[in-house]
Image (cartoon, grey):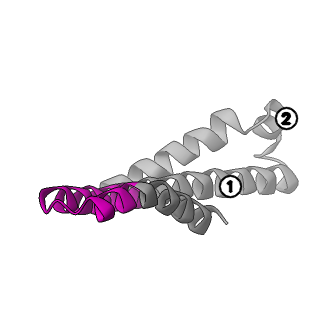
């Protein structure tokens, strides 16, 4: 987990420094408090977005893991109704997780 957080921070720093940072901010952040604040906000935004994406991916794996086990169980028990109900509920569960994470 610590290594994972390290890579999130490293990647978000890369995004803040090389994707979100303008030439003006790069040149002025060592002499201007406003430019440094702007760079800090960019870093905060990139870290937050990457964290949200990781949270969404983690929950995606949880939902798929649970629904895979349920689908397999209902198929083996020949409970076709619950088998198809679980398959139908899977995308809605993903949407629900997406809205909970991002909204």
Q: Residue 56's spot in the image, x, y percent?
A: 49, 57
Residue 66 tag number: none
Q: Which span of residues is magenta-colored? A: 58-87
Apparent side of residue 38 relative to residue 101 in the rendered image (left or right): right
User: Would you identify the image quadrant in which residue 58 lies?
Assistant: bottom left
**Residue drawn at 48 percent across, 63 percent down:** 93
Q: Residue furthest left?
A: 76
User: Would you identify the image quadrant in which residue 100 lies?
Assistant: bottom right
Apparent side of residue 69 relative to residue 33 in the rendered image (left or right): left
As helix, strand or loop, the secondary structure at mark 1 comes to helix
**Residue drawn at 34 percent across, 55 percent down:** 64
Judge by depth and name the residue closer to the eye, 80 or 69.
80
Looking at the rendered image, the disc whose residue lies closer to the viewer, 1 or 2, is: 1
The residue that label 2 is drawn on is: 24
Judge by depth and name the residue closer to the eye, 46 or 98.
98
Query: Which of disc 2 and disc 1 is earlier in sequence?
Result: 2
The alpha-carbon separation of the residues under discs 1 and 2 comes to 19 Å
Task: Verify whether residue 46 appears in magenta.
Answer: no
Q: Residue 17's spot in the image, x, y percent?
A: 65, 39
Q: Residue 102's spot in the image, x, y percent?
A: 63, 62
Residue 45 tag number: 1
Judge by depth and name the residue closer to the eye, 29 or 102.
102
Task: Verify whether residue 76 appears in magenta.
Answer: yes
């Amino acid at each position: 987990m610590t290594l994972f957080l390290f890579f999130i921070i490293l990647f978000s720093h890369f995004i803040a420094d090389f994707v979100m940072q303008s030439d003006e901010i790069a040149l002025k952040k060592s002499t201007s408090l406003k430019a440094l604040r702007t760079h800090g906000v960019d870093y905060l935004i990139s870290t937050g977005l990457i964290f949200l994406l990781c949270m969404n991916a983690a929950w995606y794996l949880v939902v798929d893991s649970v629904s895979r086990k349920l689908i397999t169980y209902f198929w083996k028990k020949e409970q076709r109704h619950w088998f198809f109900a679980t398959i139908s509920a899977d995308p809605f569960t993903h949407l629900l997780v997406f809205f909970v994470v991002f909204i």
